[in-house]
């Protein structure tokens, strides 16, 4: 199990490095995809800019892209620090994650996306940089413009799914019906991916027989995640 701020590094079959860490009191999980040959470092929801950049620097790397699953404050905690240090970063999120200012100060942080995805709920788009290629799926419900991202052996669920459970829908901008549809879509996607890929949750919240794993295989998620196992088509 990852300690706070510890990085787990693995190399996928195609040479893309996958870094995973857990940071902060809410145990936010961050994933980064690294293509050393082309100098691409794409980080999902970096929580702590200093710890991320220090770890990358030791390897002679620096971030090039930030990818946001959604714009809740904990997921965007590292945004100001990242932009201060690397003002030319590409910052990606879904168009609908540009949340109205009314809600802005409560649960969301304003992120100035340099680029956005704009697909309908349940639809997917491909995103690539260097040799990194990810599929982004618009999965609203927990938050407007929430996306999941998969590729290189990983399904990064954001706050759509945790190890045992699913994201809450009672915060401003939450939508239980949209969440239900996003979970059904997630089940379809996971069923079509190799069972040994990892599901990285947005948080390491769940208690799994007294242990809290950092991630689980997609096969285990389909069998043991309460929502994935029990959800049925309408
Ligand atoms: Fe969230």
Image (tube, grey):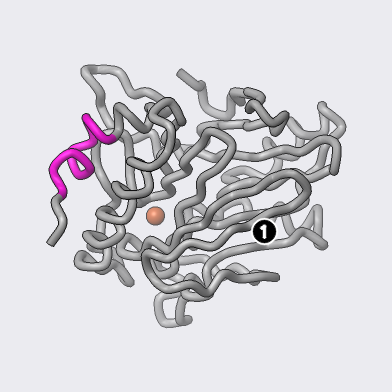
Viewer-side residue, 81 vs 132: 132
| Badge 1 density bin: few <14, some 14–19, many ≥20, Cα 10 Å | some
Viewer-side residue, 212 vs 84: 212
Quadrant of res 184: bottom left
Q: Residue at x 25, y 23 (%)?
A: 208
Find disc 1 in the rendering and name its residue. Answer: 80
Quadrant of res 177: bottom left
Residues rendered magenta in the picture: 222-231
Where is ligand 1, by quadrant? bottom left
Percent from the top left, x then y, of residue 71?
Answer: 49, 62
Q: Within 8 Å of ligand 1, the CB of disc 1?
A: no
| Direction from residue 110 to residue 213 in the image, left or right | left
* Quarter of the figure with the N terminus: top left
In the depicted structure, whether residue 10 falls above or below residue 189: above
Percent from the top left, x then y, of residue 200?
Answer: 45, 36
In the depicted structure, whether residue 131 falls above or below residue 142: above
Quadrant of res 5: top right
Q: Residue at x 60, y 68 (%)?
A: 111
């Amino acid at each position: 199990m990852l300690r706070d701020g510890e990085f787990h590094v693995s190399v996928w079959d195609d040479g893309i490095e996958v870094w995973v860490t857990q940071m902060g009191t809410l145990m936010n999980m961050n994933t980064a995809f690294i293509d050393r040959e082309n100098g691409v470092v794409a980080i999902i929801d970096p929580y702590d800019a200093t710890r991320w950049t220090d770890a990358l620097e030791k390897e002679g790397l620096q971030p090039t892209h930030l990818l946001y699953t959604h714009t809740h404050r904990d997921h965007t905690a590292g945004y100001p620090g990242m932009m201060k240090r690397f003002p030319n970063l590409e910052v990606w999120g879904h168009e609908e994650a540009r949340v109205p200012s009314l809600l802005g100060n409560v649960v969301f942080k304003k992120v100035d996306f340099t680029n956005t995805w704009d697909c309908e709920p349940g639809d997917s788009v491909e995103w690539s940089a260097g040799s990194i290629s990810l599929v982004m799926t618009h999965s609203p419900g927990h938050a407007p413009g929430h996306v999941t991202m998969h590729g290189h052996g990983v399904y990064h669920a954001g706050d759509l799914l945790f190890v045992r459970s699913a994201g809450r829908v009672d915060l401003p901008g939450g939508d239980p019906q949209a969440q239900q549809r996003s979970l059904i879509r997630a089940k379809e996607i996971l069923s079509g991916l190799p069972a040994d890929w990892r599901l990285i949750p947005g948080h390491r919240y769940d208690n799994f027989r007294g242990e809290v794993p950092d991630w689980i295989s997609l096969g285990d998620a389909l069998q043991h995640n309460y929502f994935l196992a029990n959800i049925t088509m309408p």
